[in-house]
Amino acid sequence: MKKQSLFAVLLLCAALTGCKQTAGEQAQVPVYLDTTKGIEERIEDALQRMTLTEKINVIHAQSKFSSAGVKRLGFPDFWTDDGPHGVRPDVLWDEWEQAGQTNDSCVAFPALTCLAATWNPDLGRLYGHSLGEEALYRGKNMILGPGVNIYRTPLGGRNFEYMGEDPYLASRMVVPYVQGMQALGVASCVKHYCLNNDEEYRHQVNVIVSDRALREIYLPAFEAAVTEGHAWGIMGAYNLYKDQHNCHNQYTLNQILKTDWGFDGVVVSDWGGTHDLDQAVKNGLDMEFGTWTDGLTMGATNAYDNYFLSRQYERAIREGRYTTKELDEKVRRVLRLFFRTTMNRERPYGMLCSEAHYDAAHQIAHEGIVLLQNEGNLLPIDVEKAKRILVVGENAVKMMTVGGGSSSLKAQHEISPLQGLRDRLAGKVEVDYARGYVGDVGGSYNGVTTGQDLREERSAGELIAEAVAKAEGADYVVIFGGLNKSDYQDCEGHDRRSMDLPYAQDSLITALAAANPRTIYVNISGNAVTMPWKAQVPAIVQGWFIGSEAGYALASVLVGDVCPSGKLPFTWPNSLQEVGAHALGAFPGTWREGTGIIDEEYKEGIYVGYRWADRQQLTPCFAFGHGLSYTTFEISDLRASRKTTSDGNMSFTVNVRNTGDREGAEVVQLYIHDVESSVERPYKELKAFQKVSLKPGESRDVTLTIDRRALSFWDEENGDWKAEPGDFVALVGNASDNLPCQVQFALK
Ligand code: GLC
């Protein structure tokens, strides 16, 4: 056969047998790398390609903050980082000490109590989005936050990292935060799941709590983060529940999280929260981090092969003690996390320290600042009339972004309250300063230093005398006091020992108020403090720990550039005796003989915060949801969509009018009261809210909706939510102790 005809025959064969790959063409893309396939199909393909050792390697840490990918298959290593308020500076591979990088300074966003105090879910989304962009730029695929543990006591060391006492408020604020972050391909790791309301004995506490309190108070924010926010990560807590550590807990992880709520993400241990191989295998843990560290400083070096879910697990499988059933389930979840993050080719590149992030930090900060008291409308500061202002207090100058535990940051900048006021009033008003008191002169945490030298030789009496002398004749005295994220003063690892202000601040405040009636106290903290001088201080502001833009945000509110619109996310008691956990002697717990476990029974049950205050008919120092403005609002004309409902869906409309002379924002709050129920219920519970900005004289109808869940309680008999037919009352107003509008309706 001639060459030409042979060639023609070959060509014809090739055409007939379909276009076979010629050597030069692209090799077939394997399914797990084929972005046209669904994630679940890609997971299964990757899973069956992985060796046992590769599977084991992806479910435990390989360094302080990273776990392995699968090099052979092209899955990158997986990097996590703290924290809820900004991206932590890098530490060394296997040391808690700083890596010493000069490219990892960040924007420090306000602490999450401040975010909660904005009562503005849009800012939750902005927060998650902004932090997610900083994480992307820093190469982090999972942020270890946000935290949504409930504010059970004002002594809680990490309350500043969380979103207050009410499960509904925390739920509404955490969902958009998670969504804003994950939209960028950065996983949230919502923490610390669950019942982690203590710091002092966080590794030993075994919480005993009713199912109702668990479901109605302590779980809803996590439930919302999972079922509405679709969080890709959950961090198990250190403490125990039903005698199992929460990093591997049959009840909270396998049953509630993964079965009841259908969580498809990864359960990450808290650092050092894994204690048992069999439980780690069977009780819902997917990624083990930080074993044999305390999550803060100490730790065994290069222990990664000795982790529970590491070589010993691999050995146990090879020896036939386990099949790969549990392992494959864990690896599926980790692969799903990879496809959502490191393998997500659509992810943007993020940005660090951008103007937009500073604007976001400023917006969240000033919308979260709460004007607690303003007798005689002393605030805002009259910039035109004032000649001299005296600023007093260590918290007017002390950096707050360093310290507090794992949420500590290396901020690119932090504007102090004194600097914020001086910058804002430059050329207009003299801003004098007096130290007033000495708190924590330390200026470093985990190797990050503030660079401040706050050492002071003078005694408390001399400092007070100096401040009082300078207060004479000042047009305003603005005291910045409170706590400071040092040990026992709002810091991870320890709870506060008292609700009182430390460092003799009460004496200072009392002396200054006596010396000058135009005294303003700004409290910098994440927790309530006692205020024995409240009647002597006309203006009181809750300033939170608000990060890089602190001074600018505080100045903008104090001088009236913006109207304060924050509302308290927790009840501000007059004393610990007004708090259920303390009134019932249920904090902390009692040591169980010879076990190293401390049993803590949450005896107050569902009566946390304003729920307790209502039950005991207490008048707190300031109420949950309280916050004043520089203008005034009227909420009126409450109308219900119907008198009866069969499915629980109701909407309520009120009119909100700005009856003052300047623009401001109000938070309309709706609480539900169950007139009659077969079980004891709180008098009222927050079930809807909306923030509305209005110009002077402007009015607007605001409509709030609820569903059946808003009428329900957790039925312990049937283990489900139950809404009993009968009468309910919707209470509407602008604070839990100011609900002028009420309307009754019935559930059929
Ligand atoms: C800490 C904290 C946790 C943090 C983790 C890593 O102990 O409890 O919030 O994310 O360890 O630093």
Image: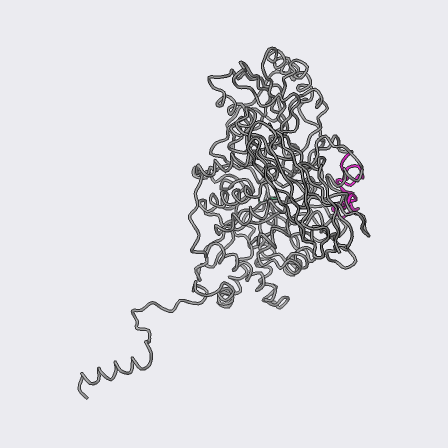
* Residue 202 visible at all: no
228 with respect to 530 (left or right): left
Quarter holding ligand 1: top right
Task: Please tell me whether residue 232 is drawn above or below residue 405 in the rendered image.
Answer: below
Q: Quadrant of the N terminus?
A: bottom left
Q: Residue at x 53, y 26 (%)?
A: 555
Marker count (numbered): 0
Picture coordinates of residue 354 (x, y %)?
Answer: 43, 38
Q: Closer to the camera, 522 or 28?
A: 522
Task: Please tell me whether residue 520 is drawn above or below residue 36 in the rendered image.
Answer: above
Q: Quadrant of the C terminus?
A: bottom right
Rendering colour mode: one colour
* Residue 584 visible at all: yes
431 with respect to 23 (left or right): right
Task: Please tell me whether residue 724 is drawn above or below residue 196 in the rendered image.
Answer: below
Picture coordinates of residue 156 (x, y %)?
Answer: 68, 38
In magenta segment, residue 580? yes
Query: Which region of the structure is painted magenta?
Result: 578-605
Picture coordinates of residue 104 (x, y %)?
Answer: 46, 39
Picture coordinates of residue 146 (x, y %)?
Answer: 58, 45
In magenta segment, residue 284? no
Q: Closer to the camera, 696 or 471?
A: 696
Q: Closer to the camera, 487 or 96?
A: 487
